[in-house]
Image (cartoon, helix red, strand yellow):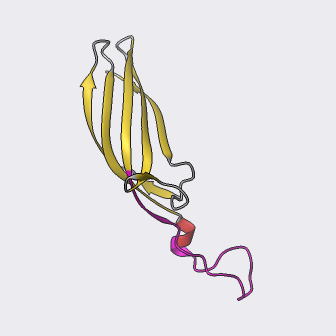
Amino acid sequence: MGAYWPVIATEWKLKSKGRFSVGTGFVEAHCIESLFKSKSQPLDDETKPKMKFEGGFWNTLHMGFAWPVKNLFMVQTEMSLVMNGLRIARDDYVGGTPLILVLGITRNF
């Protein structure tokens, strides 16, 4: 599975030196096998069905938090709800649960 997830967000610094952000973006996801194979695997005969393209574009609603840890590290979490227009993506989203969650740690130098 391949995917792209650009986000445009506005960020606020909190009194605790943490950060909070909200924004919007889009996610593009695709099944690489469906891009390059015309038939599903592992069957060999000609009666097997053709593999259809699995993927698409969806808009997202984004929220993020970041907390400083001893002025050396920043712990971050970002979440995006995957939408299809104004409704939460359902069966049409190839990524499974329509939520993207990222956790990270950044080292300050």
Q: Look at the image and say whether residue 56 sits in the magenta stretch.
A: yes
Residue at x-position 57% and y-position 52%: 96
Q: Residue furthest front?
A: 87
Q: Nearer the viewer, residue 81 or 19?
A: 81
Q: Look at the image and say whether residue 79 sits in the magenta stretch.
A: no
**In x, y percent, where is residue 40?**
66, 75
Residue at x-position 55% and y-position 60%: 91
**In x, y percent, where is residue 38?**
58, 80
Q: Quadrant of residue 74?
A: top left
**In x, y percent, where is residue 41?**
69, 73
Residue at x-position 33% and y-position 49%: 25
Residue at x-position 37% and y-position 32%: 64
Q: Quadrant of residue 42?
A: bottom right
Label the magenta part by its dominant secondary structure: loop
**In x, y percent, where is residue 90?**
53, 56
Query: Is 36 positioned to the left or the right of 106 in the image?
Result: right
Quadrant the C terminus occupies: top left
The vertical placement of 102 against 60, above or below, is above
Q: Quadrant of residue 47?
A: bottom right
| Residue range (magenta) | 35-59
